[in-house]
Image (cartoon, rainbow, N blue to C red):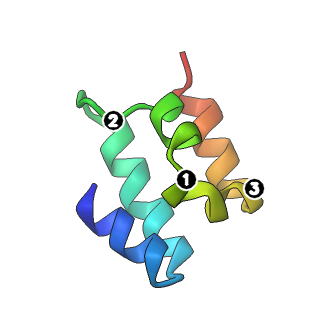
Amino acid sequence: MVMATIYTIIGEYEKAIDELEIVLSVPSWCSAEYLKADPIYAPLMEYPRFIAVLERYSK
């Protein structure tokens, strides 16, 4: 999760999405709903791949 945050902050959005896919695929405190609400990840909302990942892991 830390790497996804760093990648997002520095503008490496594809790498951030790669990391978030891994984070969401295993049980953890992080959820698609959390990522939608966290303003750090707001720039990723413009990426169809990120939206697809959120939809895949939304409850």
Q: x and y percent of residue 28 in the render?
A: 23, 31
Q: Residue at x 53, y 82 (%)?
A: 11
Q: Of callouts 3 and 2, which one flags the residue occurring earlier in the amino acid sequence?
A: 2
SS at badge 3: helix
Question: Is 1 on the left or on the right of 5, as rendered?
Answer: left
| Residue found at the very far top of the displayed protein | 59
Residue under numbered circle 3:
48
SS at badge 2: loop
Q: Around disc 3, counting alpha carbons within 10 Å, would you say few (fewer than 14), some (14 to 19), or many (20 or more)?
A: few
Residue 29 sits in quarter: top left
- The amino acid beneath tag 1 is Pro
Q: Around disc 1, counting alpha carbons within 10 Å, would you say few (fewer than 14), some (14 to 19), or many (20 or more)?
A: few
- The amino acid beneath tag 2 is Cys
- Placement of 50 over or under 54, stated as above or below: below
Mark identifier at residue 39 = 1
Q: x and y percent of residue 20 in the render?
A: 41, 53
